[in-house]
Image: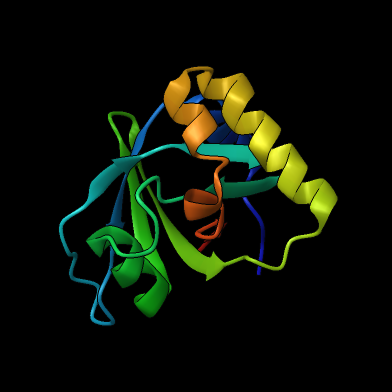
C-alpha cells in the first residue's frame, strides 16, 4: 500500500481539526466527530480524548475505515489501533500533541485514558 503523499502529510501536519467519520463496509457513513490529528515521522496519528467508549472511536476501530474531512476536502483512511508503538514513538506522539495544540486539553491527550486509544491513520 502506498503511503500518504508529501502534500497530504504536510496538510495533516498543519491542520488543526478534522472530522473523522467511520465508514461501514458498504461505504455509508456513521456520524462523525471533530478530532485532532498529528503527523509524526511520516505517519498520521489520533487519539480519543474521552477514551475508548465513544461512538466514533468504537466504530472506527471496528470497521477499520474512516473518512477525514476538512473545509479543503476529504481523505479516506484505514484505521489501526496502535497500542504497540515503541517508547520513542509514543514519546514523539505525546510531544507533538503538546507542540501542536499547547493547551490544557493537549496535556489530557497524553494521559493513559487517551493514550490507550492511539490509532494510526493510513491512506486507503
In the displayed structure image, the side of residue 32 where residue 98 appears, left or right:
right
Furthest-bottom residue in this view: 25
Work out whether 25 lies above or below 19. Answer: below
Quadrant where the image shows the N terminus: bottom right
Residue 16 placed where, x, y %?
43, 25
In the displayed structure image, the side of residue 92 where residue 22 appears, left or right:
left
Work out whether 81 lies above or below 91. Answer: below
Q: Confirm whether residue 40 shows in the render.
A: no
Q: Confirm whether residue 39 shows in the render.
A: yes
In the displayed structure image, the side of residue 114 where residue 53 appears, left or right:
left
Residue 23 placed where, x, y %?
28, 68
What residue is at 41 percent from the left and 51 percent from the top? 48
Work out whether 8 lies above or below 82. Answer: above
Residue 74 placed where, x, y %?
34, 45
Residue 44 placed where, x, y %?
59, 47
Using the rendered view, name the quadrant where residue 7 is placed: top right
What residue is at 28 percent from the left and 29 percent from the top? 71
Number of marks present in the image shown: 0
Between residue 76 and residue 80, name the one nearer to us: 80
Furthest-top residue in this view: 102
What colouring does the structure picture have? rainbow
What residue is at 21 percent from the left and 52 percent from the top? 32
Amino acid at each position: 500500500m502506498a503511503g500518504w503523499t508529501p502534500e497530504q502529510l504536510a496538510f495533516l501536519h498543519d491542520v488543526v481539526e478534522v472530522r473523522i467519520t467511520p465508514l461501514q463496509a458498504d461505504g455509508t457513513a456513521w456520524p462523525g466527530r471533530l478530532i485532532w490529528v498529528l503527523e509524526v515521522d511520516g505517519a498520521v496519528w489520533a487519539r480519543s480524548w474521552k477514551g475508548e467508549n465513544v461512538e466514533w472511536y468504537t466504530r472506527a476501530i471496528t470497521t477499520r475505515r474512516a473518512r477525514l474531512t476538512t473545509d479543503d476536502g476529504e481523505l479516506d483512511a484505514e484505521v489501526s489501533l496502535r497500542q504497540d508503538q515503541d517508547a520513542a514513538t509514543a514519546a514523539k506522539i505525546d510531544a507533538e500533541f503538546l507542540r501542536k495544540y499547547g493547551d490544557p486539553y493537549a496535556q489530557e491527550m497524553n494521559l493513559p485514558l487517551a493514550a490507550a486509544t492511539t490509532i494510526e491513520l493510513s491512506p486507503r
